[in-house]
Image: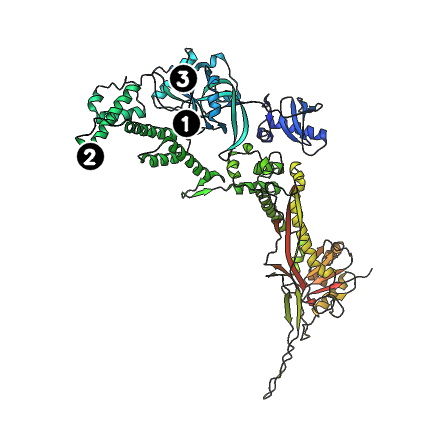
Amino acid sequence: MKRIPDIGIVGEVALREAAATECGQVMSLVRAALQEKLAVSYVELEAMYPDRVVACRDGRYYAYPYTLGEDNKVVLGDPQEVIEQYLPVRMAEATESFLEAVDPVGKTWEVVIIRAGLSGNRNYYPDTALREAVALFEGARVLARSDEEHTKGTGKDARNIVGWLSGVRFVEGAATDTGRLMSTLNFGAGAGAAALRDNVTDAWKRGKRDLVGLSIDANAKTERRVVESKPVRYARQFTKVNSVDLIVEAGAGGALVRLVEAVNKEPDAMKQLMLAKIKAKAPTVYAQINPETITDAELEQRYAEAIAAEVADKKPAAAAGNAPAGVTAEQVAETVRMVEARAYLRTAVSTSKLPQAAQDKLLADWGKRERFTEAEVDTAIKAERTYVARFVESGKVKIDEAGNVQVEDRSVKIAGMFDAFFDPAHKDHRSVQSFKECYVEITGDTRVTGRIEHMDRSRLSESMGRMFESLDSTSFASVLGDSITRRLLADYRTPNQYDVWRALASIVPVSDFRTQDRTRFGGYGDLPAVLQGDPYAALASPTDEQATYAASKRGGTEDITLEMVKNDDVGAIRQIPIKLSRSAKRTLGKFVLDFIRTNPVIYDADNFFSVAHGNLGAAALDATALAARRLAMLKQTEAGSLDRLGIPAKNLVVPVDLQGTAVDLFKNLTSVNDKTFIQNLALTVIPVWYWTDATDWALTVDPMDMPWLEVGFLDGNEEPELFVQDQPNVGSMFSNDKITYKIRHIYGGAVTNFRGADKSVVAG
């Protein structure tokens, strides 16, 4: 099993990362033992060490010693209260690559130790810190270590020393925090140093400039800051330099620049340009040059002479007679500067770590310009990084087979995280078991304070850091609300006992809250015979019956509190969408079924079930009573015509107490093969879960044969809606330490024809 490092695993994010390894097994065992000891369902761990664990209780920190036996049994010791301690941190960096130049021997190199600004490890080095660190880096040992040894600070062996630094100096940049520490790297004479030196030098000469890089191993006083909208660890002051290492991947601009006092067998890019210019404009001078041995100073002088000749050739003819033999120093300097700027362009772009397509674009655009500065190149690279980052700030960029670019929206991933938390059938449900982790992942509020300003942005992933800029105080509430809504609707659409009313009622949309009029005209009697020559008699116009109702709102609120998030109250939070859904369905079901249960006064000012309506019985449920009430329904007459409708019963509605009796009525319980009349009816038995009268029962017709009970939903929306009821205060994720969600369901209904139902109210 991978052991927990001596320095521990500190912080919730680190602990979660450790949980993906064997260390996570130890953490799970210790957490379980601690929860059992404290008699709580969840305990917040702050740090894990090989011999102790630090847990947070009521805002205070306690260290519990522990031992883990071979049987995986954890034994906890007595706790000791501890406090967080802030100490200078060790800065281990790693960055770019080698930049320019070659040397057949390579014993002495001019190097960049570290550049100011933001490193690849999200550390920020200001110019002031580098200026003050010159003396600390002077004489520093240079070690050859693996990247892992360098990062962990291990591998400090005398046999790994390959050289030292001398002549350390700070070089100002074009703008604030763009300077760099320069030095001379002196390779030693040992076998290991010689082998590494030969390898690096050979690679350099053959064009491989990024074989290794320089990286610092130093201690510094740091603080958390936000620079250029990014959370960084800001190095205020270096306190100790342990070494400067040659590693494979570097992070803060450490690089070999050129070999000091080396004879260049292969001229670099800038030197090639300068020699070509001299050859074209001053061939006589070029003939006196030995490109292999010319010094930098002599090359610059010859180049200036060639530039002067070029400028003189471009003078207007009218002024040619009086033209000076040379040109101004400013003209020469500007031309040299542009050569250097173009070389810098190629170097900066190639080491920018931008996608190759973006590098090609920059080189093509800027290579056409006659004038630009190194600072402008840096700005362009930064702008390109920002542009490319926009493609991934919401997620991954994908290109389909047709070449279409598709961006995976991060908001979809976040919503998927919550969906997985709430939905047991979700493919990722098992991996999202902590609501607190969901909250921290989305907001960065690692201590669950509920306040944006307390969010630890440095602990967010890079993609989360990009996403954070669009995060406001309502984002968490909205994302969570969307997921609760999806889970609520999924449960609402799943049929259960609360949906039995749908077999009884007709469903229609209503457009507003005004009273809905449902007018039903009666029928005509039989058409009378007309004798030959007689006029047609006027028919008696049918009467009408008018039922009315209005849609009304139903709803309530539910809270997710700061305590629920802090305590990771998974069970309660997961039940929220289910409880909201069931509450809405239950309320709607009772609203419809209460028309049968409560026997209200309806459109004709009489009770729904009455002797006058011919739809009220009194016998207990059995085959005889059922046959009698069914016959009564068949004998119901049409309004106006008094003709029998002859519409049979379709449903038998009973309390759950009568469900068995009702079902048995339609079973063939005798040995006789022929079914009885009642058994042949095979009515649909509908048990009602909340009816408390154990003897009353009812019959209803199919609403397709006769609409008798109407339920209208506002705008046809049969499903409940969920809203964030309260807008949180500015700068706070919670108002009154909670997010309140409001559920709203709008509908109404009424009995529109008493002939569609028959009820037996049994005394006793």
Tag 2 near tag 3, CB within 8 Å: no
Image position of 375 with respect to 613: above or below? above
The x and y percentages for residue 126 are 48, 27
Residue sitting nearer the eye, 453 or 325: 325
Task: Report, in whole angstroms, how far the alpha carbon at label 2 lies from the one at label 1.
Answer: 39 Å
Q: Specify the quadrant of the image occupied by residue 43.
A: top right
- The residue beneath circle 1 is 173
Q: Secondary structure at mark 3?
A: strand
Q: Name the image quarter holding residue 249.
A: top left
- Amino acid carrying label 2: it is Pro
- Few, some or many residues within 10 Å of mark 1 (<14, 14–19, 20+): some
* Residue named by callout 2: 316
Q: Is residue 469 left or right of residue 197?
A: right
Name the side, left or right, on which 532 lies relative to 405: right
Residue 448, percent from left and from top: 62, 36
* Picture quarter with the N terminus: top right
The residue to which callout 3 is attached is: 184
Of the residues shown, which amino acid type is indicated by label 3? Thr
Asked if disc 2 and disc 1 are in contact, CB closer than 8 Å, the reply is: no
Sequence-first disc among 2 and 1: 1
Mark 3, Cα crowd under 10 Å, few <14 / some 14-19 / many 20+, is many
Q: Is residue 754 above or below residue 180?
A: below
Q: At 26% from the left edge and 27% from the top edge, which residue is drawn?
A: 328
Task: Give the percent coordinates (x, y) of residue 757.
Answer: 70, 64
